[in-house]
Image: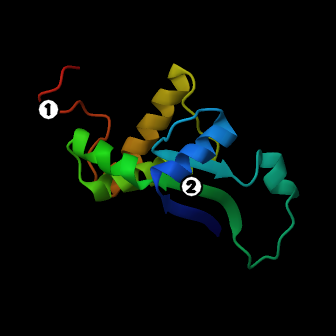
Amino acid sequence: MVEIGVRLSDDAAVRILNRDYRDKDKPTNVLSFAALESADDAAAFMMAPDMPLLLGDIVIARETCAREAIEQKKSLKNHLVHLAVHGTLHLVGYDHMVDDEAEEMEDLERQILARLGIDDPYEPIEDEPV
């Protein structure tokens, strides 16, 4: 059993978090804060058998998310789900800092979203140059 905290926030609050934790003074669509840094941390973490493992927190900027959904011609619901999936993958150790890792993470996102009936979020937007 696992637990994830999810917070829908405004761009101003996300900007502060992004500045304070990532040294980027601007809002972003989603931030993830892992409770445990490694598998060793998780193995060493003592908890009651009936207690869920807290993976961490995800913060989604609602204004950025809404704007991106419009720009990308996606439903707000589907974009929110995509950002939640993306943030969750960060909590379990996936990243996209280098091309190979980004491809692996995006492929996994596509698979998860497809199971939820959501189209590929990385498909080019119609009428937009690739």
Quadrant of the snapshot with the N terminus: bottom right
User: Tag 1's secondary structure?
Assistant: loop
Q: Is residue 87 visible?
A: no
Quadrant of the snapshot with the C terminus: top left
Name, please, the residue furthest toward the bottom: 50
Residue that appears at 46% across and 55% down: 10
Question: Is 92 placed above or below 130 here?
Answer: below
Residue 9 screen position, x and y as percent? 49, 58
Q: Give the alpha-carbon distance from disc 2 to disc 1, as whole Å.
A: 30 Å
User: Tag 2's secondary structure?
Assistant: strand
Decide if residue 3 is on the left or right side of residue 29: right
Q: Which of marks 2 and 1 is nearer the N terminus?
A: 2
Residue that appears at 73% across and 55% down: 35
| Residue in front for this viewpoint, 71 or 26 | 26
Name, please, the residue furthest toward the front: 12
Decide if residue 57 is on the left or right side of residue 38: left
Pointer 2 local density, CA inside 10 Å: few below 14, some 14–19, many at least 20: many
Task: Name the disc covering residue 58, or none.
Answer: 2
| Residue in front for this viewpoint, 25 or 89 | 25
| Residue in front for this viewpoint, 77 or 51 | 77
Task: Name the disc covering residue 3, or none.
Answer: none
**Kind of residue sitting beneath label 1:** Glu
Pointer 1 local density, CA inside 10 Å: few below 14, some 14–19, many at least 20: few
Residue 3 screen position, x and y as percent? 63, 67
Decide if residue 9 is on the left or right side of residue 127: right
Task: Name the disc covering residue 126, or none.
Answer: 1
**Kind of residue sitting beneath label 2:** Ile
Question: Is 54 placed above or below 72 here?
Answer: below
The colour mode here is rainbow
Name, please, the residue furthest toward the left: 127
Residue that appears at 65% across and 32% down: 23
Is the residue under label 1 in contact with that under label 2 (CB below 8 Å)?
no
